[in-house]
Image (tube, rainbow, N blue to C red):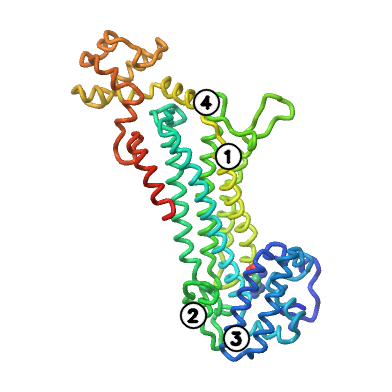
Amino acid sequence: MMLWGGRFLQKNNPLFKKFNSSLDIDFRLVKQDIFASIAWSKALLRSNILTEEEQKKIETALNFLLQSVEHDPDLILKSDLEDVHSWVERELVNIVGVIGKKLHTGRSRNDQVTTDLKLWCKHKVICLFKSIKNLKGAFLNISKKNVNTIMPGYTHLQRAQPITFAFWCLAYIEMLNRDIDRLKDAYRRLDISPLGCGALSGTSWNINRKVLAKDLGFASETKNSLDSVSDRDYVIELASIASIGMIHLSRFSEDLIFFNSLESNFITLSDEVTSGSSIMPQKKNPDALELIRSKSGRVIGFLMNILVVLKGLPLSYNKDMQEDKRGLFDSLDTWNNCLLMSTLILENIDINCSRCLEAAQKSYANATELADYLVQKGLAFRDAHHITGRIVLRAIKENVPLENLNLNILKTYCNNIDNDVYGYLTLESILKKRNSKGGVSFQQVKYAIENVTKDFDKY
Ligand code: ARG
């Protein structure tokens, strides 16, 4: 049975039938479609469109259908129907007969599909919260163990100033907190029910949309039917949030790929998440991280895709919108999988603390400190910067760290330099001094770890 055959004299061309079908994608909405259909049948009962007996039969049949699908998910894919909504209705009619044909009273696939999709998104967002939290937990654990692991911090991929491994972890925790914040904000807008809006202009039946929304677990109901069936802002929002989230994971991957390279050798990735080369026996490649980096491109690609699809659409529903689900499902699945993979990778890294320290020591990362020291001795920062640059050049020429230049040499660059300079140039002293809020000092990092631990469930 098709949902709309009456007006047609000819059958659909098989090529078009296949082209028009979204069942291979939207079968994933089957639970939501059944759930929303049960809620709709109750609304029809409240409006005396269905009798109590009819509603009961429909509800029982739909629950039975749900169980069958859970048992054999391929059941739907064997069908050649247009979409999941057609499938649920056809199966319902097969089970309960003509009563099942009453279910679509006052309802359109236009309000149905966006209701199903919003329900699906709400569920997926909750899954994403959990995955983000797990990754945050992994960062937090590593940060707690590495408050004293000194390493170089980079700008332009040049060693810039010393930081600690814990500080690096805390930076990613901030990003993840923003991801959670964004999802929470999007959830508020997802949590508004479009059911009862009909095709575009509302329904002539006496449906209490507020009660219906509550039944579906939505916080409230939408305000304008024309907007409700046209709105896919939530798809764009989730695509955008996923893209930002994936950018975070991609940068994390890039950091770890670099840290894991023999050139840095700050960490070693576990065998569990790396693979070998078919020709070079010595190789251990960071495949998992490279895949995360590249999958971010796919997620960002869908954001552009959905923006372009929607930009030229007149109100209200257009079949173009059927193309929203493939990419959305893929993007949110991909983000979730990459979160799981990042957690696994991070939980199993081996940090080479002595190598991190050595790199920080050999980086002239204490040059800013020397300039600040000169400022304390009365020089203007610009002059202090210039003199320090000259001293760095000398140290590079002699192939020694700044603190290995003796006082006589230092004095030739600036007579204000005294013996106390050496105390300023140690990495510990540098880290200790960066005690501004959010700075890298041991004290600030400990404070940040405490706060993240305290607020862990707030996000
Ligand atoms: N399969 C469609 C979609 O995913 C459902 C809505 C179809 N509505 C219609 N009037 N053709 O968007």
The residue to which callout 2 is attached is 210
Up/down of 40 relative to 325, above or below: below
The residue to which callout 3 is attached is 44
Disc marking residue 264: 4
Label 2 sits on what residue type? Lys
Left or right, 183 with respect to 417, comes to right
Q: Considering only order in the chain, which callout, 3 or 4, is on the residue closer to the N terminus? A: 3
Residue behind label 1 places its C-beta within 8 angstroms of ligand 1: no
The residue to which callout 1 is attached is 345
Label 1 sits on what residue type? Ile
SS assignment at label 3: helix
Specify few, some or many for label 1: CA neighbours under 10 Å numbering under 14, 14-19, or 20 or more: many
Q: Considering only order in the chain, which callout, 1 or 4, is on the residue closer to the N terminus? A: 4
Q: How far apart are marks 4 and 1 (CA)?
A: 18 Å
Q: How far apart are marks 1 and 2 (CA)?
A: 46 Å
Q: Are marks 4 and 1 in contact (CB under 8 Å)?
A: no
Q: Nearer the viewer, mark 4 or mark 1?
A: 1
Q: Distance between the residues labelled 2 and 3?
A: 14 Å
Q: Considering only order in the chain, which callout, 3 or 2, is on the residue closer to the N terminus? A: 3
Nearest the viewer among 42 and 33 is 42
Left or right, 302 with respect to 371, comes to right
Q: Are marks 1 and 3 in contact (CB under 8 Å)?
A: no
